[in-house]
Amino acid sequence: MNSFLEKLLNYYHLSSQEYEVMTRDIDTFDLEDPNNFLNIQEAASLIKNALSKNKKIMVYGDYDVDGICSTSIMVNTLNLLGGKRGYYLPSRYVDGYGINLTRAQQIADKGYNLVILVDNGVHQDEAVHFLLDREIKVLILDHHDFERSPDQRAIIVHPYLKKEKNVLNCASYVAFMVSRLLLDGIDEKNLILAMTATISDMMELKSYNRILVRLGIKALNSNKNNSLWKLTNQAYIDEKVLGFDIIPKLNAYGRMLEKAVISRLVEFVLNDDSNIAEEIIAVNEKRKILLRQEIKLLPDFKDAHLIVYYKKDLKEGLVGLLAGQLANLYHKVSIVLTDSSEKGVIKGSIRTANDFNILSLLEEEKSYLLTGGGHHSAGGLSLKKEDLTSFIETGNLFMKKQVIEEKDDEYIDISENEITLENIQTIETFKPFGQGFPEPLLGIRINTSFLSPIGKENQHLKVNNQSFSAIGFNMKKPENAETCLLLGNLEKNVFNSHITPQLRIIKIKP
């Protein structure tokens, strides 16, 4: 075993046997058994019964990538089975998150007999009650945190409800499990969609999530006709291309458009000949411009225990992105709020960049919240504008009492001669990287004099050393330090068809 591989095994706390198991060839037989989910047989029977009786089925999703993909999985499955189905992706601006009473009434008026709620449902009590009271069956395929069913008459399939607990899954994963039972097999398009949402919703890449992502990436690269290829210029799609190139474009379309037209995304991901790719890309470019403008306007929050930023005219589709930016910048729980369409009500997103569970903060603040929920590290909330000051005060007091330890950067100490293409190939055997299994962080100490500013405004840094190449974006050269520690990831640098190894600098420490 080479010494660099040993360093990687120590970094991930893996034995050589565990490494062999993790990197072995896998196939669809390695996926989780759908029957590990409680209520999944009842869910499949409910859908099969509706299909056999030619009943009308409505699939109601969400505007983020998990909502888009889970809706598409169920629509694709019903299409393959020949069902009479409708579907709807809500507008963040018109409908808000989750099925509401207005949409439930419209669904009832149109004569639907079964409503499948994907990536929502466990907190939509009023709409669920309304549908069931009118003898419309309700199936909930959700993954958001919940303690009780919105209505005992509804069937719920959820990662919390498993015979053997393993890892939290996204809603698309749940929909994919249901589709496997209905189709008595695996549809490749459904597999790719579930994989995409698992990365988008930042599910831990462990256990069955990891297997799903490996199989989905393999399937996507074997089918260059899949519509997702229209959103990238890359020759190979891995988890990084999905996470930083493709998924943001889908999210932007779902979150930025104010009219209820985002249901077109279902047609895009299901139909390989769809022609709205250019429109999706254009919306994302607009989103990036608006986000840069808003970032420049952010105040300083270094003294806050809890970051709460309210702006009345903020584009609602930017609140989650800004909250994420603030959380990553200050390493603190961050909330970004803006006015909602309901008078006197503000709503927004909450993010954290550490191990703190935001659900505990939402629980502490529940007396002020009209709505609130989500996952360990991300969520949404709404409250009356008149309660904002009290909400901020209570939140700051609560967060001041929390002990959130800043973790030291765990990294692999390397030398210049270890920055090689061969070692990049060794790192790639550990893929996919993501939540719970990050790309290895490497550290090398250099003389500060080797760092040279580059760029129009000298805003980037490059190592001016013939022994190895390293580059860091939006970084400043350390002052009054003879040496510094570069922390980053190894990557391939392609220039004029020539491939060389390079360290992408993430952080510089004294």
Image (cartoon, rainbow, N blue to C red):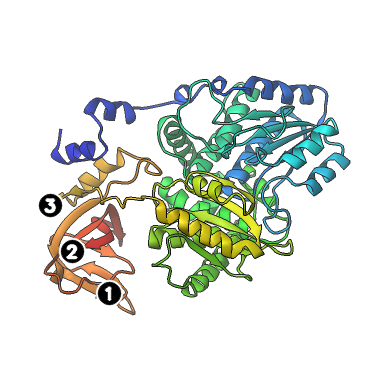
User: How much space separates mark 2 and mark 1, taking CA atoms?
Assistant: 21 Å
Q: Is residue 370 visible?
A: yes
- The residue drawn where x is 69% and y is 35% is 150
Which amino acid type is marked by label 1?
Ile
267 displayed left or right of 488: right
**Few, some or many C-alpha atoms within 10 Å of disc 2 (few <14, some 14-19, many ≥20)?**
few
Q: Position of residue 110 (x, y in %)?
A: 87, 41
In which quadrant of the rendered image does the N terminus lie? top left
Depicted 312 relative to depicted 433: above or below: below
Q: Position of residue 494 (x, y in %)?
A: 30, 58
Q: Are marks 1 and 3 in contact (CB under 8 Å)?
A: no
In which quadrant of the rendered image does the C terminus lie? bottom left
Instruction: Give residue 454's mark.
Output: 1
Query: Which quarter of the figure has residue 465?
Result: bottom left
Q: Position of residue 187 (x, y in %)?
A: 58, 30
- The residue drawn where x is 52% and y is 68% is 291
Query: Which quarter of the figure has residue 300?
Result: bottom left
- The residue drawn where x is 57% and y is 53% is 250
362 displayed left or right of 211: right
**Which residue was labeled with disc 2?**
510
Instruction: Give residue 51's mark.
Output: none
Which amino acid type is marked by label 3?
Asn
User: How much space separates mark 3 and mark 2, taking CA atoms?
Assistant: 22 Å
Depicted 172 relative to depicted 440: above or below: above
**Which residue was labeled with disc 3?**
417
Which amino acid type is marked by label 2?
Pro
Q: Nearer the viewer, residue 116 or 162?
A: 162
First in sequence: mark 1 vs mark 3: 3
User: How much space separates mark 1 and mark 3, taking CA atoms?
Assistant: 24 Å
